[in-house]
Image: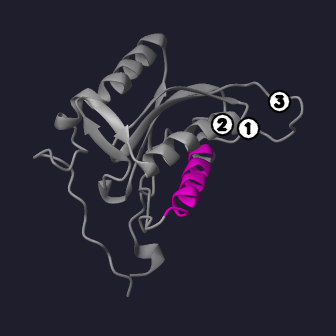
Amino acid sequence: MTRKALPRRRSPRLTHYDYAGPGAYFVTLCTRHHACLFGHIEQGRMSLNAIGDIIDTTWHWLGDHHEHIVLDEQVIMPNHLHGIIFLTDQQAARSPIPHKPLGRLIGAFKAVSTRRVKELPHPPERLWHRNYWDRVIRNQQELDTVREYIRNNPLKWELDRLNPEHRTSVRSPPERRMR
C-alpha cells in the first residue's frame, strides 16, 4: 500500500483553534501500550518509583523552563499522567522566543523525560504513547470539575479503564513488526 492509499488519521485537536494562545488545557499522556511504569496505587495513593519520580521532576521542569506556562493540578498514575496547563500571554522581557504551542510543549516534556529515564539501568524500550489527549477548559466550572477529577483519580484506580487489572480495561495491541 502506498503512502497515498493509506487512510488519513484524524487529528483529535480542534480545527482552527490556536493552541499557542492563552488558554487552559486538561492533558493526558499515556505510556506505550498502557504499561504500568511509574509506580503503583496503594490504599488510594500513588507511590512513585524511580521512573515516576523522573516524570514528576520533568513535569515541574516544564513549568520552570517555559515562563509562559503555569502548571496547575496534576497526578501521575501507574501508566498515565493527567495535568492542567495554562498558557499565558506573558512574554518574558529577556526572551524574544515566541510561545510554543501546546503540542510542542508536550513534545518537549516527552523528549526530556524519555532522555532522563534512558539514564536508568534497564529502561523501557519505549516510554510514551505517540500522541496525547487534551481538552480545552472553557470556564471556571469545567476547571473545578477537572481539578476534582485529577485529585480523585488515584482513589478510583480500581475502576479506571486504563488499569490493566480492570476487567474492561483497554488491551494493548500486539507489537507490530517492521518488514
**Residue 114: where, in percent of width, then height?**
53, 58
Residue 64 location (% of width, % of height): 68, 34
| Relative to 110, residue 20 above or below | above
Q: Which residue is mark 1?
A: 99
Whole-percent x, y for residue 134 in the image:
45, 37
SS type, badge 2: loop
- Tell me the CA gap for discs 3 and 1: 10 Å
Query: Which residue is tagged 2?
Result: 20
Amino acid under label 3?
Answer: Ala
Residue at which label 3 appears:
92
First in sequence, mark 3 or 2: give its number: 2
Which one is nearer the viewer's eye here, 124 or 89? Answer: 124
Q: Nearer the viewer, residue 12 or 68?
A: 68
Residue at the extreme top: 141
Residue 178 in the image, given as x and y percentages of width and height: 38, 83
* Dot 2 and dot 1 residues touching (CB under 8 Å): yes
What range is drawn magenta here?
Answer: 105-120
